[in-house]
Amino acid sequence: MDLDKLKTTIFSTKFFGLIIGFIVFILFIWLTFGIGLISNIERNVLDFNFKSRLDVILNRYGNKQDKVGVTRYYPNPRVSQDIFIVGIDNVSLDRYGNWPFPRSIEANLVNTFTRIKDQSQRENSLFLDINITERELKNPINDAYLIEAIKRNNRVYLESFFHEIVSSKDINERNIIRQKILFDKHGVFDHQQIQGDWNRIKTYYSVEAPLKPYAEVSAGYGNVAFDPDRDEVFRRQALISRLSVLEKEIPLEDLLNEPALVETNFERYAWMDKNQVIHDIKYPISDKEYETLKRTMAINAPLKEQDNDQNGTIDERYYIIRKYKDYVIPAITLSLVLNYYHKDLKDIDIVLGKYIRIPEPQVYKPYKDKWTPLLKKAAQYNFPKAFSKADYDSILRSFSAKWQADNFMSAYKRNILFDKYVLQENISNDSLQMLVESLLSINYDQIQLLEDEILQTELLIPIDDQGRMLINFMGRPSSTATDGVQSFLIRPFHYYVADPGTDPEGWRQSQSVENKIVIVGMFATGLADEKPTPYGLMFGPEVNANSINTILMQKFLYNVPVWVNIFILLALVFIASLITSRLPTLFSLIISLLMIGIFFLTVTFIFDGMNLMIIFSGPALAVITTFVSIVAYRVMTEEREKKKIKNMFGKYVSPTVVEELMVNPPELGGVDKELTVFFSDIRGFTTLSESMTPQALVNHLNDYLTAMTDIILEYKGTLDKYVGDEIMCFWGAPLPAKDHALLACKCALKQMDVLHELNNRWPVEKRINIGIGINSGIMTVGNMGSMGRMNYTLMGDNVNLGARLEGTNKQYFTNIIISEYTYGLVKDHVIARELDNIRVKGKNKPVVIYELLDMIEGYEV
């Protein structure tokens, strides 16, 4: 019995709903962290989070037309003002002809930045995002001009474009030689700098490197290849990658005889399958692993055939093992950032799956003309008493866009914190004069950092186990902005290509590029590949700018710890299972959708404000799955319960009552309720049975019971049982009925009328007379019996009284007797006469009984 109750409890919707929730929780743990299926959906959520940023939606920053003919640039505080893009746009193409331009024009651009009177106002670095892998055939002297310009500039970074597929052997060998010049001049990462499985780092097998003379005069290099996600959208950049150089090919049979690999030199063995996919070989290799490798290559690797004596006959057939030496190299963005922080490749540490560490980063201060330590937070300064910080703030908030463009002011402003200000036009000449005089009077060496400022001893760039950083894109592509909004400061190429000449007197004081990372690249549709990003198609220079900005502004995107995502998943699934298993379906659906909506807003605001990424799609889908699963279980359970109810009550009550019971199931089990019980019995049944054959008696009795039962069901009664010729039924359960006593009385009178009609049709010897007893009161009703076999019936003293009243009809020669309790409930509707005050068997208290004669208003249903 206890086991059956436990089983019933477990499979009840309220309890089993929680079990369903737990199953869904485990399923989504597996989908999210096991096979990574949720990550495919989560990429789209990340894209939406980028696009739903308030800065982007409200269009807060960029070029704005405040007045007719007056356009002002409002910088985004999340975007470093030390990133500057020079775009080769359509206007530049119209001026200088088809691309590629003569390299003398590019030399002029480099010279423009080199030849600045105040060298402290020069660029931090100049990255030419231009392919220089072939000489200029039309006018070779232009190569000399550009090489000399790059050499004089001494801050020019060149790109290397890496490819995953092996190109032509001769071409690749030439490019490898060029690339090694960059390696020798600027370095690569050595084994001691890298912690973790370096075989996980993105691998490339061919390269397009700049020409040798360019490589020799460059200030730095980096890989510009982008690694898209599975949906071909660029969201990450491999800050480190591997260039694999083929050292030699050996037959598979000679592998075990080869000298041991020197892993500190990034050496490895690999083989190529028939689809030109390269597979690493675990090293050192055991005999068993070697045999497995042989079988695998026999199925999947191409067989090399060799004619040694050139006689047309194949002399050797073998499978090829390739020995590679890998060079771990930086992305161009990492090289530019390291230069910005006054560091070299050899200075940093790499922990794959965690971070790239830049120790003791420094930044150049143009107004001091020296490198200073990077601060953890924006600097605050104590100004001389003659000019308070409050005075400075007041004036700074009001200086005009024209004044902002002044190089000295912008350098001072940017390097002394003021990135949150309001531009106004109404500044007076007196205020400007006071500002200038006050600034000139400041001794910058006496400016003291406040005590709460702390030097940043290291900068940690988060990366995954492949060395990739998630780019925190700052806004829509500037190239497609129709409203003038630019995420980064972009100027046309043709602004900077006028030859400044060699006379310093003709040079400009500055080019507004002080300490900026200047990126020169294509911004003309059709001439350069645009990369799919979360904001749509974006030119490569701006993708690189977003990557650099992520590091400079330290706006890194972090995944919350795994346990946080698991806890959120568990909490939401638990709440969803709790409400769905206990509340109405529609209400629980509304709450579930509301919960998902609130969770989405929370995820979005945390992403926008804290740069933290919480997995949204997993918990959201888990809530929906939980809801659907529990609702489906409820439907199946309710159908089963309805079938059970139909089987249980279909023979006892009318079909209408059965339908109502399936909508509102009764509480099964013994419950005390006020009911009316009805007993009827045939008078002289023994004499009747003796005058008829058994078969005739059964048929005759069935006719009588059918007629009486139909009336009971017609008056919404519940048939309890037949005991021979006796009928027991009741009103008020399983469905409640306020007029249960009145319905029982109407049913009794209707039965007498129908019995009279039946007796008129039957011969005298078959006629039947019955007695009916009716009582009302508190009775126990419910399923009674064993778990395997039970009946829905009544128990209690009031049930026994009803049975006694039915037998009392014999003494008073009546047909229907009701108790005083029933009479009290129906006295305003019936015609009855008081018979007696009797003490029935088993009852000490006398009971007043009445003969029911008729109804005042009829007894139709």
Image (cartoon, grey):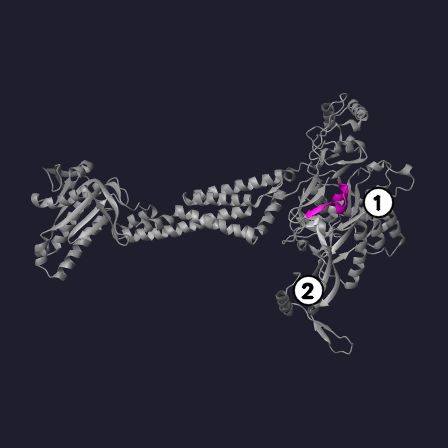
Q: Is residue 345 magenta?
A: yes
Q: Is residue 173 magenta?
A: no
Local crowd size for mark 1, using a 10 Å CA cut-off: few (<14), some (14–19), many (≥20): some
Q: Residue at x 61, y 46 (%)?
A: 46
In terms of secondary structure, where does tag 2 sit?
strand
Q: Residue at x 18, y 41 (%)?
A: 798
Total marks drawn?
2
Amino acid on which the number 1 mark rests in the picture: Asn
Residue highlighted by disc 1:
154
Amino acid on which the number 2 mark rests in the picture: Met
Q: Nearer the viewer, residue 396 or 21?
A: 21
In terms of secondary structure, where does tag 1 sit?
loop
Q: Which mark is residue 272?
A: 2
Q: Is residue 683 left or right of residue 358?
A: left
Q: Nearer the viewer, residue 456 or 387?
A: 456
Relative height, residue 199 to residue 113 (above, below): below
The magenta-colored residue range is: 337-350
Local crowd size for mark 2, using a 10 Å CA cut-off: few (<14), some (14–19), many (≥20): some
Is residue 84 in sight in this rendering? no
Q: Is residue 448 left or right of residue 692?
A: right
